[in-house]
Image: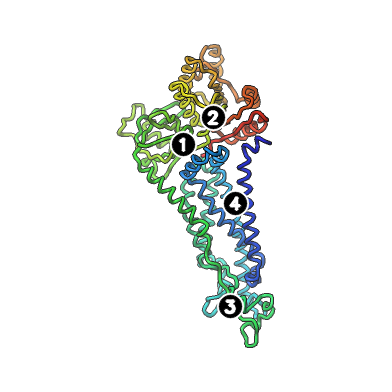
Amino acid sequence: MGNFIANEGLSVFVILVWLGINAFLFVHFYMAFLVERWYYTRVLLGQALPWARAPAACLNFNCMLILLPVCRNLLSFLRGTIQCCSRTAARQLDRNLTFHKLVAYMIAFHTAVHIIAHLFNFEFFMDAQLNRNTSLLTFVLSEIGNGDNAAFLNPIRTNETNPTIVMFTTVAGLTGVAITLALILIITSSMEVIRRSYFEVFWYTHHLFIIFFIGLVFHGYARIVRGQTVASLDTNKPQNCSDKFEDWGKNGSNCAVPEFAGNPPGTWKWVLGPMILYVCERIVRIYRSHQKVVITKVVMHPSKTLELQMKRKGFSMEVGQYVFIQCPSVSRLEWHPFTLTSAPEEDYFSAHIRIVGDWTQALYEACGGDKNEPQEAWKLPKVAIDGPFGTASEDVFRYEVVMLVGAGIGVTPFASILKSVWYKRIQNNQDVFTKKIYFYWLCPETQAFEWFADLLQSLEGQMTEKNMMGFLSYNIYLTRWKEQEAAHFRVHHEAENDPITGLKQKTFYGKPNWDNEFTNITSQHPRSKVGVFLCGPPQLATSLEKQCMSHSAADVKFIFNKENF
């Protein structure tokens, strides 16, 4: 329980506060439309009125939040500011995309409730016009404002129309349709299967948020939903006058014809601040994208992995950070995130890019990856860089004991960490707070090991020479293999060096027994706080998080961190 609080306590608190604010706003605005001012509106619309207005308030609140988790520069600034005070609070910023998705789901939910309620509202408005009986209060209310049209209650002014026509001929209707279509496209294109297989579709449709916010700001401009004015309540109190509607405005009557007005648009007050912040964020990104970046070296690694070594004036990074890369010759609009694999101590920064889609394939070809001869420097494509941005891995040297778990290309953030270890501990004899690193790499194919094995071999040799082998314990797992590969492994199993990686530490076959690994670390490091860092699939994250929970005790705590960008 204690470890759950340490790992998830603040996240749970934030989510509960967010849900509590949503619940409060819903109840508050639901009750606000049950007061006397909205009595005559409810005569026309019934309970559909508060059911439309309450989710609208929640939409304003969540639309205020939705842009903040994707303001990367703001989050990096906050992370650097608060991590010196609270590591737990800083870790919550690494879950920005998770919160972004939760807010999006809440927006979708309240949008659905809002739309359904308004569909009923328009039917009720239309029914009031069609049932032209002067003995009915609903018809009398619908006729108010027919003269100068200044104080109407029913926005459908004639019975010779239908709700569909009204929907596409009013500001509220047109903006509502635009908002809904934009939201549907954004959410559906964000599904995992589309985002992984058709990233361009996800990327382009996400920019429909511009239409979404423009429509949102102007949606209430026409003030279609109206209530009785304060001045009118003095001359027509619903509890006294609603039954005397046939005498409204006549001589000797104490009840004047009621007047109605809508609330002034208020959505802009909720979203203006975040919109300004986001515009500033984009300006910073544009400025960075125009800074000159020089590709100093291109390396084609096995398993179709491209390494770009680059330089940019004033570039400064920390271990585990990532950048967004744009290649104008491939696409002027697309930016893709890649973890930095270089160390802060190096005079360049690098990224390893696995060729898995159209954009990466085009970049691979632009860099000469499909050619046998080396690419001349002047023929290399121009690239733009936005970043670097912080991740959970920045905190790795704040733990005395560290577990690094990478799956496939997910090993890239740990390349930066291990290189930095080499510079700090081996080359410069610099003391660091971290005393022990356990490194696990799970990979489904032998070729993927090759580009990273050079670094591990260098570390292994240097640490053996300086008698520091106890500092880094590394375990490499091959999770899939072919029959001919298995025969080769058996023949060379007794060799001094591993047949796959060339390391003295032999490769394991299959998947780790995480229960045994955590038990071993617990026994080796009593009274320690262990940082567990993962860059890998959600299934592995779930498994490791459960292990962190179950193996934490009074004297040992496992703190789980996952790369999330």
Please state which amino acid type lies under the numbered disc 3. Ile
Of circles 1 and 3, the one toward us is 1
Residue 32, quarter of picture: bottom right
Label 1 sits on a secondary structure element that is strand
Name the one closer to the observer, 535 or 372. Answer: 535
Q: Residues within 10 Å of mark 1 (few under 14, many from 20)?
A: many
- Foreground of the two, 483 or 430: 430
Whole-percent x, y for residue 73 in the image: 46, 44
Kind of residue at badge 1: Tyr
Find disc 2 in the rendering and name its residue.
406
Q: Earlier in the sequence, mark 2 or mark 4?
A: 4
Asked if marks 2 and 3 touch (Cβ < 8 Å), the reply is no
Looking at the image, which is closer to me, 368 or 522? 522
Residue at image mark 1: 322
Q: Can residue 293 be seen at all in this image of the molecule?
A: yes
- Image spot of residue 389 (x, y percent): 46, 39
Report how far apart the C-alphas of labels 2 and 4 lie in the structure: 32 Å
Spot the residue most to the bottom.
251
Identify the secondary structure beneath mark 3: loop
The alpha-carbon separation of the residues under discs 1 and 3 comes to: 62 Å
Q: Residue tagged by mark 3? A: 144
> Which callout, 4 or 1, points to the residue nearer the camera?
1
- Of 260 and 234, nearer the camera is 234
The CA span between labels 4 and 3 is 37 Å
